[in-house]
């Protein structure tokens, strides 16, 4: 159970996002181009862009409805006006395990609580769908993302070299 300070902080954060004019909503097909641009920006800005990457690694973003808008999975976007400023997704991995995917926040909206809000939306979805744990991976270059996950109780479970990048794996047991 969350303590009173955490609940107050989260309510304040949701109100602040509303005040900033940000709405977190389910992905719609009209979002496709902006999702792709946000994904590419995130990779470039964090140094996680891998020029020789297998194009299949991004197939899920070409088939969002098929991959994420299914039972036990979901894809959200954060919209400010007519522009997407963030996104995240949950993918059903096993009956009790969900995978957090595609967490991105555009440069001008970083460090304003949007990543935290997206993470909370994803975790709430996972609890509501009966998941007992969430797993994710990121890279050693994505320091802000790693701090966000660790601050929210995600535990580092391993690493793996991928070309010049070090993949970092995390897991969180849900109460």
Image (cartoon, helix red, strand yellow):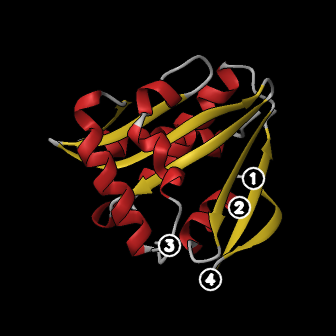
Could you say which disc has been placed on residue 92 in the image? none
Give the foreground label among 2 and 3: 3
Mark before the other along the chain sequence, 1 or 3? 3
Q: Which residue has dot 2 on it?
A: 150
Mark 1 touches mark 3? (CB < 8 Å): no
**At numbered mark 3, what does the secondary structure look like: helix, strand or loop?**
loop
Where 11 falls versus 128 (above or below)? below
How packed mark 2 is, by other alpha carbons closer than 10 Å (few <14, some 14-19, many 20 or more), is some
Q: Which residue has dot 4 on it?
A: 164
Q: CA distance from mark 2 to mark 4?
A: 23 Å
Give the foreground label among 4 and 3: 3
Residue occupying the point 30% across, 27% down: 28
Give the percent coordinates (x, y) of residue 53: 52, 66
Mark 2 touches mark 4? (CB < 8 Å): no
Q: Which residue has dot 1 on it?
A: 153
Give the percent coordinates (x, y) of residue 29: 28, 29
Could you say which disc has been placed on residue 52 in the image? 3
Q: CA distance from mark 2 to mark 1?
A: 5 Å
Q: Quadrant of the C terminus?
A: top right
Give the foreground label among 2 and 4: 4
Mark 1 touches mark 4? (CB < 8 Å): no
Q: CA distance from mark 2 to mark 3?
A: 29 Å
Mark before the other along the chain sequence, 1 or 4? 1
Where 59 falls versus 168 (above or below)? above
How packed mark 4 is, by other alpha carbons closer than 10 Å (few <14, some 14-19, many 20 or more), is few
Mark before the other along the chain sequence, 2 or 3? 3
Determine the image quadrant of residue 100. Answer: top right
Residue occupying the point 81% across, 27% down: 96
How packed mark 3 is, by other alpha carbons closer than 10 Å (few <14, some 14-19, many 20 or more), is few
Mark 2 touches mark 1? (CB < 8 Å): yes
**At numbered mark 2, what does the secondary structure look like: helix, strand or loop?**
helix
């Amino acid at each position: 159970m969350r303590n009173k300070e955490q609940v107050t902080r989260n309510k304040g954060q949701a109100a602040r996002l509303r005040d900033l004019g940000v709405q977190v909503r389910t992905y719609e097909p009209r979002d496709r181009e902006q999702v792709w641009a946000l994904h590419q920006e995130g990779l470039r800005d964090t140094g996680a862009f891998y020029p020789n990457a297998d194009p299949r690694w991004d197939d899920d973003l070409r088939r969002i409805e098929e991959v994420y808008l299914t039972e036990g999975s979901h894809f959200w976007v954060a919209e400010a006006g007519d522009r997407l400023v963030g996104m995240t997704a949950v993918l059903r991995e096993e009956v009790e395990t969900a995978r957090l995917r595609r967490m991105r926040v555009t440069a001008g909206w970083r460090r304003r609580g949007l990543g935290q809000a997206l993470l909370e939306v994803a975790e709430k979805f996972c609890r509501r769908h009966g998941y007992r744990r969430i797993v994710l991976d990121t890279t050693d270059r994505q320091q802000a993302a790693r701090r966000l996950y660790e601050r929210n109780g995600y535990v580092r479970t391993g690493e793996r070299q991928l070309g010049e990048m070090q993949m970092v794996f995390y897991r969180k047991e849900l109460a």
